[in-house]
Amino acid sequence: MASGFWLVVGLGNPGKQYEGTRHNMGFMAADVLAERWSVNFSDHKGIAMLGKGVMNLQGKSIKFFLAKPLTYMNESGTAVASISSYYQIPPEHVVVIHDDMDLEFGRIKVKAGGSAGGHNGIKSIDRSLGTNAYARVRLGVGHARRGPNAHDNTVNWVLGGFGPDQRKQLPEFLADGADAAETIIFSGLSRAQEQFNGR
């Protein structure tokens, strides 16, 4: 029984063409955590890149899995449900890091439950886990111009890259996203909300 484990999931789309796009913020934050805690990814059943590590903070050691689903965004739940049932990790030990168009670039919101806010990855996880009682680290990417082609604009926006200014800020922003996930695990959701939601 691995119930002491946590599962941190960074959302994104697999494949070269999606690297460095807004929709892959979760993958990028997961990579920061992997580097920080020396996690090596390997293939889990063809549906996720999965690694195992130990976080040592505040005099505590916490074992965790780090996952990047390979299922494309709208099927992310398949990977999350498979890993959490395989390793018997309850939803309250799951932290999902994802991009969020309702927040300006650079803003972070930590929450548990609530609506998927139109995010297909989150909708899929809610469906597959049968609950939304897991924690989420929402990384703001801002939104596309509204207009007659709103849907196409949105798709092009989330699958687009960052401008030079944002690229400069990205490493620090992703490090903050990684910090937020760690804070949830070590200090609890409300502490993480106090620390990150007001910025």
Image: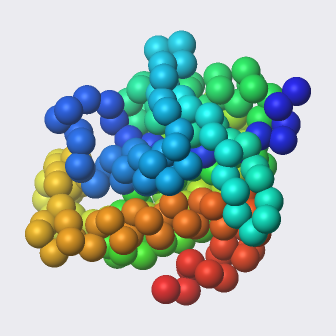
Q: Is residue 152 above or below residue 176?
A: above
Residue 166 visible, this orientation: yes
Q: In terms of depth relative to the viewer, which is nearer, 68 or 122?
A: 68
- The residue drawn where x is 77% and y is 35% is 89
Q: Quadrant of the N terminus?
A: top right
> Residue 102: image x %, image y %?
40, 68
How many marks can you see? 0
Q: Is residue 38 above or below residue 72?
A: below
Q: In terms of depth relative to the viewer, which is nearer, 178 or 111?
A: 178
> Residue 198: image x %, image y %?
55, 86
- 38 displayed left or right of 148: right
Q: Is residue 1 above or below residue 60?
A: above
In the picture, residue 143 is in which quadrant?
A: bottom left
- The residue drawn where x is 85% and y is 36% is 3
Q: In terms of depth relative to the viewer, which is nearer, 177 or 56?
A: 56
- The residue drawn where x is 62% and y is 81% is 195
- The residue drawn where x is 68% and y is 45% is 54
- 6 displayed left or right of 178: right
> Residue 142: image x %, image y %?
30, 69
Q: Residue furthest bottom?
A: 198
> Residue 123: image x %, image y %?
54, 42
Q: Residue furthest top?
A: 45
- 11 displayed left or right of 147: right
Residue 122 visible, this orientation: no
- 114 displayed left or right of 14: right
